[in-house]
Amino acid sequence: MENIFYKYQGTGNDFVMIDNRNGLFPKEDTALIAKVCHRRFGIGADGLILLENDSETDFRMVYFNADGNEGSMCGNGGRCIVAFAHFLNVIGKKTVFIAVDGLHEATIDNNVVSLKMMDVNEVKEKTNALYMNTGSPHHVQMVNELKSFDVVKEGARMRYGIYGEKGSNINFVEPNASGGFDIRTYERGVEDETLSCGTGVTAVAIGMYHLGNTKEKTIPVNALGGNLEVSFKENNGLYHDIYLKGEAKQVFKGELTWQN
Ligand SMILES: N[C@@H](CCC[C@H](N)C(=O)O)C(=O)O
């Protein structure tokens, strides 16, 4: 069958997922991808992800933000595509795949995906904030009263204001009563707050350790759409063996009925 799509969500970060092993999806059609992701004129999603063949790994992940442009690494999308590859029988319970930021190892067990993220070699200290690349660029800033914080207004202002045209994803974080951290993220390319951002959650866990706000190297981070866990090792400010773990679920299947 042609034009079949699946919808996945990982802690509320939602993606249209397409098996593009036949290479037929028109991935240069930015307007089509944006329309597919549009929440009123399309299916509605934070991004669209293609699963493609790769000669050296189990598959290739190609990720587009909701604006139709190819994005940098998506941690929740990475977890969701592992669940999708498992569903398609492309992989068993373990995989190595390639994404825009390089190789990723992952395991899946009962919808829970643990995804190895790229190493973080530098955490930049800014005024009242940190900045790092966890596969995607992330600004991490602590705030009081995160629940009522205006993430969309402040995130949009800082995304361009501090980081220029290319911008950055903007994360706001507050310690919670369970010893972990609560996070809310303004996502570049979605240009809105999303319910969860995996590379952002990873940046927050590393950032809180870097600042000495926790001594733990396995850190629960709660997003609006669900809870994730980040674990890592650290040597002299270099972070490696970083894993992002949490649920990733298929929520429905459908057929694209328009071309553009
Ligand atoms: N939701 C993603 C982050 C996607 C990348 C980002 N929007 C960008 O291109 O900057 C995640 O789960 O990591």
Image (tube, rainbow, N blue to C red):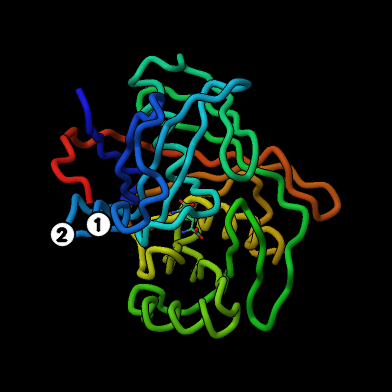
Q: Position of residue 88 (x, y in %)?
A: 34, 19
Determine which residue is flagged by label 1.
Answer: 35
Dot 1 amino acid type? Lys
Q: From the image, which quarter does the N terminus lie in?
A: top left
Secondary structure under badge 2?
loop
> From the viewer's perspective, is 46 left or right of 166?
left
- The residue lying at 56 percent from left, 28 percent from top is 97
- Could you tell me which secondary element the residue under label 1 belongs to? helix
194 above or below 72? below
Say which residue label 2 marks: 41
What's under tag 2, amino acid-wise? Phe
Do residues under tags 1 and 2 come within 8 Å of each other at their CB atoms? yes
Q: Residues within 10 Å of mark 2 (few under 14, many from 20)?
A: few
Pick the front one: 220 or 89? 89
Q: Position of residue 42 (x, y in %)?
A: 18, 54
* Rendered location of residue 187, percent (x, y): 44, 65
* Disc nearer the start of the sequence (1/2): 1
> With 256 as the anchor, is 182 left or right in this view?
right
Residue drawn at point x = 71 percent, y = 61 percent? 210
